[in-house]
């Protein structure tokens, strides 16, 4: 039996976070109508992480989603998710949902500030698919900015909030 005084780690400290990335609530997230240098740097960090992972079993197509959020204590942080595909495709999870599920460990209420997505697609940046959007709509407000990039980090696109 484990000792009774054994300390359980805080789930927030064990969620996947990418080193070297910090965010504030006042960050641009493309709201000025363009992708700035800092956003490109962030996308390149995410892309390097994507390239370091083994491709999933079924599709061999890597997707990384990074969500910037504000927790119930007013702290701004981020969590990262990757797509995973076991032998049976019905058991798969997309990167966006993997990151969103991790947010269940965060002090409520959680406000999503931005979603970054980088995929293995070489030419075009891809936006989240319909299942990801449905899941995302259960946690995000209309003011969420979605920023996407291709694998070469040469094509950047974003959906900024509707005023």
Image (cartoon, rainbow, N blue to C red):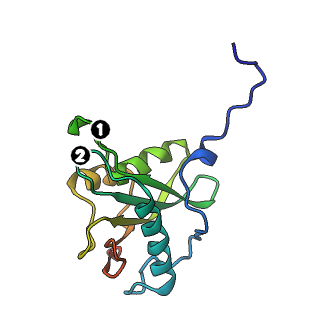
Location of the C terminus by quadrant is: bottom left
Residue shown at the point (53%, 76%) measured from the top left: 27
Instruction: Give the vertical position of 103 relative to 28 (above or below).
Output: above
For the residues labelled 2 and 1, the Cα–Cα distance comes to: 7 Å
Give 57 or 145, whichever is nearer the viewer: 57
Q: According to the image, label 2 marks what residue?
A: 58
Q: Earlier in the sequence, mark 2 or mark 1?
A: 2
Location of the N terminus by quadrant is: top right
Quick one: label 1, few (<14), some, or many (20+) residues within 10 Å? few
Rendered location of residue 115, percent (x, y): 41, 64
Residue shown at the point (49%, 86%) measured from the top left: 37
Which picture quadrant has residue 51? bottom left
Quick one: label 2, few (<14), some, or many (20+) residues within 10 Å? few
Rendered location of residue 93, percent (x, y): 31, 44
Q: Is residue 18 left or right of residue 92?
A: right
Residue shown at the point (23%, 76%) measured from the top left: 123
Marks 2 and 1: CB-CB under 8 Å? Answer: yes
Q: Secondary structure at mark 1?
A: loop
Residue at the right extreme?
5
Please tell me the numbered disc located at residue 86: 1
Rendered location of residue 90, percent (x, y): 22, 37
Give 88 or 24, whichever is nearer the viewer: 88
Which picture quadrant has residue 105? top right
Q: Secondary structure at mark 2?
A: loop
Residue at the top extreme?
1
Please tell me the numbered disc located at residue 68: none
Instruction: Give the vertical position of 61 relative to 146 (above or below).
Output: above
């Amino acid at each position: 039996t484990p000792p009774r005084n054994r300390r359980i780690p805080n789930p927030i400290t064990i969620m996947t976070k990418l080193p070297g990335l910090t965010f504030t609530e006042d960050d641009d997230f493309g709201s000025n109508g363009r992708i700035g240098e800092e956003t490109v740097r962030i996308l390149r960090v995410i892309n390097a992480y994507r390239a370091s992972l083994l491709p999933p079993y079924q599709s061999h197509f890597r997707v990384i989603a990074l969500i910037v959020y504000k927790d119930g204590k007013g702290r701004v942080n981020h969590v990262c998710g990757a797509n995973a595909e076991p032998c049976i495709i019905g058991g798969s999870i997309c990167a966006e949902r993997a990151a969103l599920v991790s947010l269940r460990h965060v002090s409520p209420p959680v406000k999503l500030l931005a979603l970054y997505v980088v995929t293995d697609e070489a030419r075009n940046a891809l936006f989240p698919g319909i299942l990801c959007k449905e899941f995302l709509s259960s946690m995000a407000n209309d003011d969420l900015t979605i920023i996407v990039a291709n694998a070469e980090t040469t094509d950047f696109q974003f959906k900024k909030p509707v005023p």
